[in-house]
Amino acid sequence: MLKLLLCVSLLLGGITVRAATVELKGKAAVTGKILEEKKDQIIIDIGYTVLVIPKSQVVKLLDDDARAAKAVAAPPEPAVDRGFYSASIVPPQERSVRELVNELGEAVVQVRTPAGLGSGFFINPDGFLITNFHVTEGETQISVEVYLQKNGQIERKTYKQIRIVALNKFADLALLRIEDKDAPKFSCVTLGDADKMAVGDTVFAIGSPLGLERTVTEGILSTKTRQIEGTLYLQTTAQINPGNSGGPLFNLRGEVIGVTNMKITFGEGLGFAIPVEAVKFFLNHRESYAYDNDNPSNPYRYLEPPSRAKKAASQ
């Protein structure tokens, strides 16, 4: 055994050993110490054995120093599932409200109809946004005002080609889409998990109360299980007023945990939001709530008037 170790030591005595990662075809990789690099093969020590790898199977050879530099230059993004909407897999770090408002402000919009206004927020870059059902109830002429930050200034842009994609009256949710030809890719939010919030946690809302766009209000989560007419809501001390309806309620991780939709008018600090779990259910089953009379799964059926009424109307 001693003779074998001595032979190996003598053989490697004149070789410069360096740590590296060899990326192979088939998305495999081997990390170890390069003993020798020949024209057609690489000899690498992986600790318990020595491998001879044909260069025809090598995609890339990356030294550990270069790999570390690459990692520093491009830190990994937070783990997020980006489907129709984005949802955190690994929650990001908490930050201040000031930092988050600057980052998230562009994703919050104002929704206008002939009857009034509310708020909303983009859930993906393709112009899909969430608001309250009661903001758009009975309306088809809808416009959305977006606030873009350019060179430290706010630039307002109004879009008027708005399609109602899905509605859920009982959950007070509506899914809209901007379909203007000049519409760009939009900033969007990440949906969080209200179940992981604790009573007393800091939350904040962004919206357009009384038409005052981009208004930020901060408070705490008062309770997660306030029951109103058989439905559970998040209760918050963050100020909620008419015009906030349909806007996002954020945690300090920058995730949406609820959709603000009402307040108790004769009290202060008594605002309510639809838990984000209801939003996810609505989005995951949006085809069942599609705004389309021809959809057999549509829960809303618009019936033809009785024949006598129809006859009178035609006269």
Image: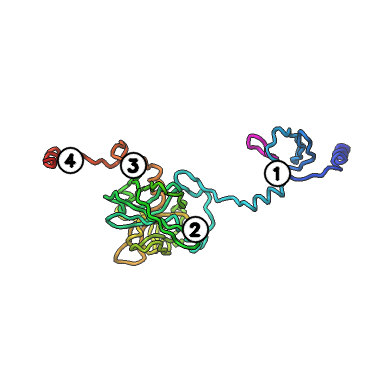
184 lies left or right of 116: right
Q: Are marks 1 and 4 in contact (CB under 8 Å)?
A: no
Q: CA distance from mark 2 to mark 3?
A: 31 Å
Image quadrant for the N terminus?
A: top right
Q: Residue at x 55, y 51 (%)?
A: 78
Q: What label does residue 62 carry, if any?
A: 1
Q: Amino acid at mark 4?
A: Pro
Number of numbered tags placed on the structure image: 4
299 lies left or right of 10: left
Name the residue beneath numbered marker 2. Answer: 103
Residue 214 is a magenta residue: no
Given residues 38 and 172, the one toward you in this image is 38
Q: Earlier in the sequence, mark 3 or mark 4?
A: 3
Q: Amino acid at mark 3?
A: Ala
Q: Amino acid at mark 2?
A: Glu
Question: Could you tell me residue 20's position as x and y percent?
Answer: 73, 44
Q: Are marks 1 and 3 in contact (CB under 8 Å)?
A: no
Q: Would you call the spot at circle 1 few (<14 residues within 10 Å), some (14-19), or many (20 or more)?
A: some
Name the residue beneath numbered marker 4. Answer: 305
Question: Could you tell me residue 284's position as x and y percent?
Answer: 41, 43
Question: Could you tell me residue 63's position as x and y percent?
Answer: 72, 46
Q: In terms of secondary structure, where does tag 4 sit?
A: loop
The answer to which image quadrant residue 296 occupies is top left
